[in-house]
Image (tube, helix red, strand yellow):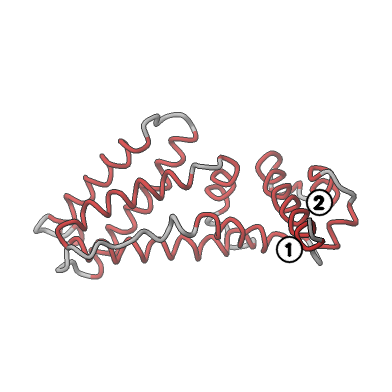
Amino acid sequence: MSRQTNKERTRLRLLQAILKTIHRYGHGTLTTGRVAQLAGMAQPTFYVHFRSMDQALEQVAEWVAAELGPAFEPAFSPESDRAAQVLEQAVSKCTRSLVEDRKIAEVFLSNRRDRTTALGRHWTVLTGGLRERMCQMVVQVRPGATPADAALHAEMLVSIIFGLAEAHLDERVGDLDRAASVASRAIISSILSNTGVADAA
């Protein structure tokens, strides 16, 4: 194994240890000593890979964003008559990918709105990208949707993804695919209705 591979493996262990520390003990307990101990190495090793805990948190945020990113960029359908089905599948795929790793899911869901931390700032951008993608898919399902209507439906779809992920992690929802299907079909029905949600309100 090359020296570079070993270095990368050690860095990843430290990132995982940071995530595990936040998951187990909370953000306020994060110290380089605790992280190094959890990773099974000496504290000075931490500073071989990161200048500071802030830099390490930036890299944790980027790592998690890279893990979740592909699922948060659902594909479009070239056929407009399949757009609703593709949107339903996108909601299911995003939700299932989010809960794939419980640690990542719980830390992401509890920190995604905290703009005071590197984690929250990065994940706000990631969530914004998902919101924008869902907005584009809403317009594909109903090309005549107003921007306000598309944005509102996209917001509801993102809320469904995060809400179902939390419900699944809390064991309140067992069949995640069915729950995602039921919820997304309700939103698709609203998207396709002649009266926009914004008008109805």
**Quadrant in which the N terminus is drawn:** bottom right
Question: Which residue position is annotated with label 2?
Answer: 31
The x, y position of residue 92, in whole percent, is 35, 45
Q: Nearer the viewer, residue 70 or 194?
A: 70
* Residue drawn where x is 19% and y is 57% of the image: 197
Q: Position of residue 98 (x, y in %)?
A: 48, 47
In the orientation shown, which residue stands out farthest toward the front? 1
* SS at badge 2: loop
Q: Residue 54 carries which label?
A: 1
Q: The residue under label 2 is which amino acid type?
A: Thr
State the SS at label 1: helix
Disc 1 packing (10 Å; few <14; some 14–19; many ≥20) = few
Under mark 1, the amino acid is: Asp
136 relative to 86, above or below = below
Q: Are marks 2 and 1 in contact (CB under 8 Å)?
A: no
User: Is 18 left or right of 99, judged from the image as shown?
Assistant: right
Vertical position of residue 95 compared to residue 126: above or below: above
In the image, what residue occupies the spot 37% across and 53% down? 158
Position above or below: 70 against 189: below
Q: How far from the left and from the top, in percent, is residue 172?
A: 42, 29
Q: Which residue is drawn at the image coordinates 28% and 60% (left, top)?
A: 152
- On the image, the x and y values in percent for residue 56 come to 73, 61
**Does residue 72 appear in the picture of this structure?**
yes
Q: In the rendered view of the protein, which quadrant contains the C terminus? A: bottom left
Q: Quadrant of residue 150?
A: bottom left
Residue in the picture at 83% in, 43% down? 40
Disc ID at residue 28:
none
The tag earlier along the polypeptide, 2 or 1, is 2
Asked whether residue 201 is in view, the answer is no
Quarter occupied by residue 168:
top left
Tell me: 11 left or right of 79.
right
